[in-house]
Image (spheres, rainbow, N blue to C red):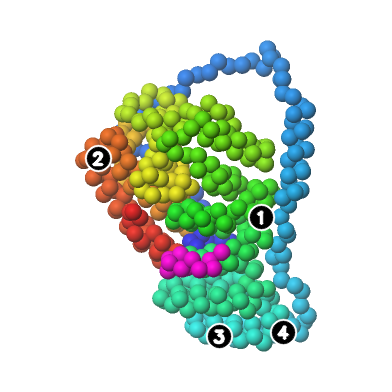
Amino acid sequence: MSTLGRNEPCHCGSGKKYKKCCLNKDEEKNRMNINSNNEGYIDNDFEEIFEEEEEEIVDAEFEDITDKEDHKEINNTLKELRNKYSCKKFEEKPPDISADEQKIVDAWWHKFEDVYIKNFDLFKCIALIKDFVINHPKLVPNLYLHEEAIFEIEGNSLRSGNYDDFINFLKWYRDNAFNAYILGGTYYDLSLIAYQLVNGDVTDITKYFSIYKEYPGHDPDNLMRLVDLFKATNNQELLIELLKDIYPYVYYSPGIIGVGDFVQPILKDTMCKYLKRDYTDQDIDSIVNTMNDFSNLFPDMFVQTNREFWIHLLEDMYKRVPEQKHLKNKKEAEKYFVHITNHFEVFLHEARGKHWITAEYYSVLILEYLFKPLEKNKIAKKPFQLNKERIDNYLANQFRDIIGIREIPGLSFIQALFYFNEYLWETGLISSECRDSNEGVCRDLYEILYRICLKSNYGARLFEKFPQC
């Protein structure tokens, strides 16, 4: 996909690994851009808001009533769960080979460099790789094609219009040299999945889940991209099939940031049958029971188990229609924006046919956008009127990758803004003039971002239609 990894070929075309070439320069440029953009807030568009100060508690006047036994019990439970959901170790280093075998590898690379670096020829590259796979199958991992060559071949095939040929090769490589394929398999499989989705072929697509399922803690970045891809394209069944057996293993894998994002789709899928306009007390009880089950499985993750909370949330979603409101302070703004996005989620599900997981994905993108100025104690004077410059800066800061915008959340955010604009108009929160202006902003930005993403990512074609429905 579009994210450039440290071990992938540098975008400058030098043929070196990114980490050994332009990584430091790009990171410094990224920091400078972020500092210069400063979130793109335009003073005239915003006003200061203040939180009500809470009474300060003086430590000397109080004692800690935390139950140490409770902490001990939770820690013991977490230890047991981490042991239970320990992931299988992934061997990233190819096996050692003899000096004679290394000579075979070196001789192949000497020939390969002529068609890979000096005068790139996609079909000669593929032919040389296939020849080596057939004649020296055990040595293929020691070519280290997963570090640079396959990525460069993919990029060249995309630029030259020969991507179908690359995909056919990648499938052959998976079938005939899996011992080498697996070293970059989570990235390759993501490309194969995106290709099949673009071409409307989901036949046997789940076979490309095998590496993610066998080594769930190995590559959380590409796993998260796949999760976002399924969310953004309304593929709830494929997403659940991917995560249903592995989400606890990912959650308890050490060193992974944002592990709750792998749990949330399963949680939403479990409770969505209780989300309906004619919900009953039994439905609320079922939601609370579901939350309790997840709380037991993930005792260190905040899971809302309070029944009154769910009563209030369902009323926000189904019974209370948001009204125009002048927001006076931060807490009031947060509460109002949460209500609106909860109500918006139902609109996406009922009026736009989005699965609940996709509806939540879009509504959260909007909530994060509405919340962003509140971090600086500011609020837009017209929070529902879109400003092209402000949205552009938000995209650059919120979805920035090392060399560009992450295409899945970036394009999904503009898609979500478009739906949100429709929702606001149908709910009576904006005028027809505002709706038309907002729609123009969305269409202009989407067209620009889509063209950019298309150059570096075949899977961006999944987002060709705007709006999606």
Q: Which residue is mark 4?
A: 103
Callout 3 amino acid: Ala
Looking at the image, is 215 positioned above or below residue 281?
A: below
Q: Are marks 1 and 3 in contact (CB under 8 Å)?
A: no
In the rendered image, residue 121, in percent from the top left (x then y), is placed at 49, 83
Q: Earlier in the sequence, mark 2 or mark 3?
A: 3
The 10 Å Cα crowd at callout 1, few under 14, some 14 to 19, many 20 or more, is: many
Callout 4 amino acid: Lys
In the rendered image, residue 317, in percent from the top left (x then y), is placed at 42, 34
Q: Are marks 1 and 4 in contact (CB under 8 Å)?
A: no
Figure quadrant of the C terminus: bottom left
Residue range corresponding to the magenta coloring? 195-206
Foreground label between 3 and 4: 3
Marking on residue 127: 3
| Alpha-carbon span between mark 2 and mark 3 | 57 Å
Foreground label between 1 and 4: 1
Marking on residue 217: 1
| Alpha-carbon span between mark 1 and mark 4 | 35 Å
- Whether the magenta-drawn stretch holds residue 200 is answered as yes
* Residue displayed at 46% across by 23% down: 51
Please, what secondary structure does the residue beneath circle 3 have? helix
Please, what secondary structure does the residue beneath circle 4 have? helix
Q: Which residue is mark 2?
A: 434
